[in-house]
Amino acid sequence: MKRIVILASGSGTLAQAIFDARLEADIVAVISDQPNAAVLDRAHKAHIETFTIPMLPDRTEWDRELETLIAALKPDLVVSAGFMRILSERITSRFKIINSHPALLPLFPGAHAVRDALAAGATETGTTIHWVDAGVDTGQVIAQERVEIHPGDTEESLHERIKIVERGLIVATITSLLTTLEKKNG
């Protein structure tokens, strides 16, 4: 059975969709950088092991701790599901990692994609699942799905509609990837 590790920093709605999907894989752990993240409670309720590695003053040491933990978990796939940290090149080159982003990359990379799409006057946006590299939302696109921007949309209303699409797309993408994955040296 393939092994999945989830990285998450927030409420965990994306992780919950993955937990609920009944994938042909073991979700072996959720790792968060936020000790009070709601995703940790969701993982506990799903009987999934959790780990917290808060950001350290020395970023190199934090990267080393995260890399060591991921390696110990022996994942076939790491899923960044609302993990609000840029991963080092050492980590991204060692593990197969995907991320979900609330925009149609390469448009609107970064932490404020929904706000940026609205500010730009875009008429549509969406969600992208992509491979993670050491850049900010620069990895190869795996899948995308469009979401229309309605007149009067706020950042919150648009983001909620994107999240609905995002949850389905990440589960479908993981399901597809599980059939083709081979482990990187880890």
Image: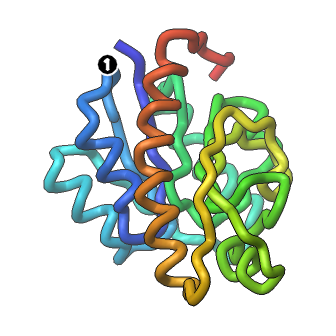
In the displayed structure, 109 sits above or below 94; it is below
Using the rendered view, name the quadrant where residue 68 is placed: top right
Asked whether 49 or 135 is in front, the reply is: 135
Residue 153, position in %: x, y? 56, 84
Task: Give above or below for 54 relative to 126.
Answer: below
Q: Is residue 39 left or right of residue 114?
A: left
Q: Is residue 164 left or right of residue 130?
A: left
Residue at the spot 59% in from the left edge and 50% down from the top edge: 100
Residue at 56% from the left image edge and 60% from the top image edge: 83
Residue linked to disc 1: 24
Indicate the colouring scheme: rainbow
Left or right, residue 182 beside residue 69: right
**Secondary structure at numbered mark 1:** loop
Dividing the image into 4 quarters, which one contains the N terminus? top left
x and y percentages locating residue 4 in the rendered image: 43, 31
Amino acid type at mark 1: Glu
Q: Please tell me which residue lies in front, 43 or 100.
A: 100
Residue drawn at (49%, 10%) of the image = 179
Q: Position of residue 138 (x, y in %)?
A: 84, 49
Is 182 left or right of 135, judged from the image as shown? left
Residue 52, picture quadrant: bottom left
Q: Position of residue 130 (x, y in %)?
A: 69, 41
How many C-alpha atoms fall within 10 Å of the one at disc 1: few (<14), some, or many (≥20)? few
Which of these two is toward me, 37 or 120? 120
User: Which residue sits at x=57%, y=10%?
Assistant: 180
Let me know if residue 63 appears in the view: yes
